[in-house]
Image (cartoon, coloured by chain):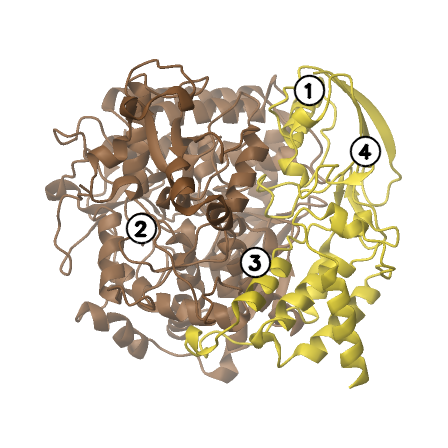
Amino acid sequence: MWVSAAKSKLDSKVPGGAIAEKWDQHRFESKLVNPANKRKFTVIVVGTGLAGASAAASLAELGYNVLSFCIQDSPRRAHSIAAQGGINAAKNYPNDGDSIQRLFYDTVKGGDFRAREANVYRLAQVSVNIIDQCVAQGVPFAREYGGLLDNRSFGGAQVSRTFYCRGQTGQQLLLGAYSALMRQVHLGQVKLFARREMLDVVLVDGKARGIVCRNLINGEIESHAAHAVLLCTGGYGNAYYLSTNAVNSNVTAAWRCHKKGAFFANPCYTQIHPTCIPVSGSHQSKLTLMSESLRNDGRVWVPKNKGDKRPPSHIPEDERDYYLERRYPSFGNLVPRDVASRNAKTVCDEGRGVGETGLSVYLDFANAVQRLGQPAIAEKYGNLFEMYQRITDQNPYVEPMRIYPAIHYTMGGLWVDYNLMSNIPGLHVLGEANFSDHGANRLGASALMQGLADGYFVIPYTLGHYLASTPLPAVNSDHEAFKASANAVREHLKKLLTVRGQKTVKEYHRALGAILWNDVGMARHKAGLEKAVESLRKLRADFWENVKVGGEANLLNKNLEYAGRVADYLELGELLTIDALHREESCGGHFREEHQTPEGEAKRNDEQFAYAAAWEFGGTGKAPVLHKEKLTFENVHLAQRSYK
Amino acid sequence: MKLNLKIWRQKSTAHTGAFVEYTLSHVSPDMSFLEMLDTLNEDLIKKGDDPIEFDNDCREGICGMCSLVINGVAHGSERNTATCQLHMRKFKDGDSITIEPFRARAFPVIKDLTVDRSAFDRIIQAGGYVSVNTGGAQDANCLPVPKDDAEKAMDAAACIGCGACVAACPNASSALFVAAKISHLALLPQGQVERRGRALAMVAQMDAEGFGNCSNIGECEAVCPKGISIENIARMKREYLKAALT
């Protein structure tokens, strides 16, 4: 089903020296582009979320010419905007024992020892600068009465290192980065291309020199040349059909790069978030996340007895199973996401799930309301309670919320080295689109941190080094490579529109999601994964025989955009499943039923699998080629994760 | 539920549009309004008709991409609710629903219910930021902000840039949108240095885009999915006057 590369082509370019000095030393050793020369370089940044907007603004401030692309009508709408809970930083303002070393350790451990140490350490180092930068931009973080910044504990951390703006942290951080980007547009340093979808990366002499995109308003296929391309296009959670991602979030840009030679790493590391509003019916188009900050005060439980259909208020205390508190006394309801999700699935599989479908658990605030009073709870979580009531028509102050896990984030992504460059020279990948920092599981409030770290504080240094040290002859969009790519893109679109079959794109997407959720979801096993590969292949073949795409090629046509994305998900889904099949261990979000401890916890196999799996495209429907980047742990002790 | 829908169809900016009527049965009360439209589009695609184009993305009320005027009200008649958070349980079997795009001279229709709101980006470009480059910031806690000011700034900063305020205003004024950004930054110490210039530049750009003037009608606040108060417009007017006179 897959082949292993005879010799791995991967060089992580992690600098030598002590971990705390690597980034400083690397910055010193990196080549610089003279201020007067920066204006001679053009950089394409695809995506305007936290990673893309911060990168585009920061590079423009340095003097590079930046071309910024997004699929939405405005860069401000990128899906980073929906992040609720907060952003971590090792500021140690609360004086509670935090440090760069501790944030680093927590992140490596939280990722179940499947991330690259040096990247994570750098992330923890620059986290403190991010908060300074955002405050300077005017991001209205929550404050104490003395006027200083407030912090909270979040997602299983034992220190309070999370900065937040009510339940809208992602929105405010994104608007900060967006405003910096708009300032550069005003200054003429960034040229903005909204409502454009990148459909191919263009390589000249093996280097990324531009992109081909579709103007979503008039369908025109456009070519743009540059000296480097930055992909900041987010994750691929929507492959599962139902996820908490925005409906337009997609893998297409990253997948097209993969098909041009960029390695896709650890696609099976998908995060399933424990606190989402349960599915209500087949019409559902997306799932809504309830911030996991709710687990600070809410208690998770199900009835002790199978099939107990009494309303929650009729179930006495001693017939309730607060299973997280019972199994993990020291972390309780605050265990990391993968652990909380898996446990919810376990109790539902035991027949103890609640609600009409039996696929949900209670998140109960009765104790907290009693302890703190309703006004205090309303101040902390008011907007979330309101959102819950709006969607479910139930009042969480009166009866417990019902929650169930849903796909939320993808740790896997295009492989990058320490400089955030993929194995294609010039193609850099930032934020959720890359694979580098979260290992097999991401901790809460760390996605915002990584997106902004990559964009504000890493890429400005590493891209400069690439541009200063690489010969890049002049190339414009008349080059043959652009013409070939644009033709291939046109053909692909035409093919989608001319199948004229019977089934809609959504029907295929839903079928794909069902396969992935059932067999490549929270718990996976060999036979199920093998079956899934077969089903996915059949589904993909059927798609190209029988799909029906509405609308025209030269007008705004969301159905055509959607068709292209689902076609790519069908291919990605297969790779994701093969990756899950090949990784004969459990780690983080990847749980193989064959590999668990007697207590039912994830059991890693460090001897054989302490590596990042970077997959080379082998051709559609052909075996992908596995390259391994060995992960070495010199600064943290490899241990079984325990939250008992 | 069964619904009678009257929906604005327009092929492109250059074409003239018209209402088209559709009947949709099997609508579940648990559907969101956009899921109801998804269902209609599935039917249209199967029949070989052009699906209806409408902007949407996060479907949880924060990205500001969804729009729609529903029975004459921007984002529908639920208070503090974006169209994507509106659920069909708010409607009854047999209801007739009219669905139009956000209409304003500064928001030209691109197709069907999709409009061009890039004027908002250009207003922010004119001055909706603090001019700090990456890297030079002082320690975040060197800049204390009174909690009340921070809260008020956050109230204004919660704007999602959807444009409902414009669609609801008889003058198609974008005053609430512009005021929210001017207020957010005027209330914080970070925004002081460029306070005057910001108010002047953003208001000038708002006028240049073809938005109308504010005449204190208050429809904008009524439809705002984030409940942004017209107090901010009063603050913007003070900011503008102060800046213009000094």
Q: Depth check: B166 or B151 in front?
A: B151
**Can residue A473 be seen from the camera position used here?**
no
Whether label 2 touches label 1, CB < 8 Å: no
Image position of B84 (left or right of A543): right
**Can residue B213 be seen from the camera position used here?**
yes
Whether label 1 touches label 3, CB < 8 Å: no
Q: Depth check: A274 or B48 in front?
A: A274
Looking at numbered disc 3 in the image, what kind of residue is underneath it?
A: His
Among numbered discs 2 and 3, the one appearing first in the sequence: 2
Looking at numbered disc 2 in the image, what kind of residue is underneath it?
A: His
Image coords of residue A496 (percent x, y): 59, 30
Q: Which chain is brown?
A: A
Where residue A456 sits, quadrant-wise, is bottom left
Asked if badge 2 and badge 1 are on a common chain, one would say no
Looking at numbered disc 4 in the image, what kind of residue is underneath it?
A: Asn
C-alpha span from label 4 to label 2: 47 Å
Chain of the residue where label 4 is placed in the rendered structure? B
Mark 1 nearby-residue class (10 Å; few <14, some 14–19, many ≥20): some
Residue assigned mark 3: A479
Where disc 4 sits, the SS reads: loop
Q: Depth check: B8 or A615 in front?
A: B8
Q: Depth check: A267 or B240 in front?
A: B240
The circle drawn on residue B43 is 1
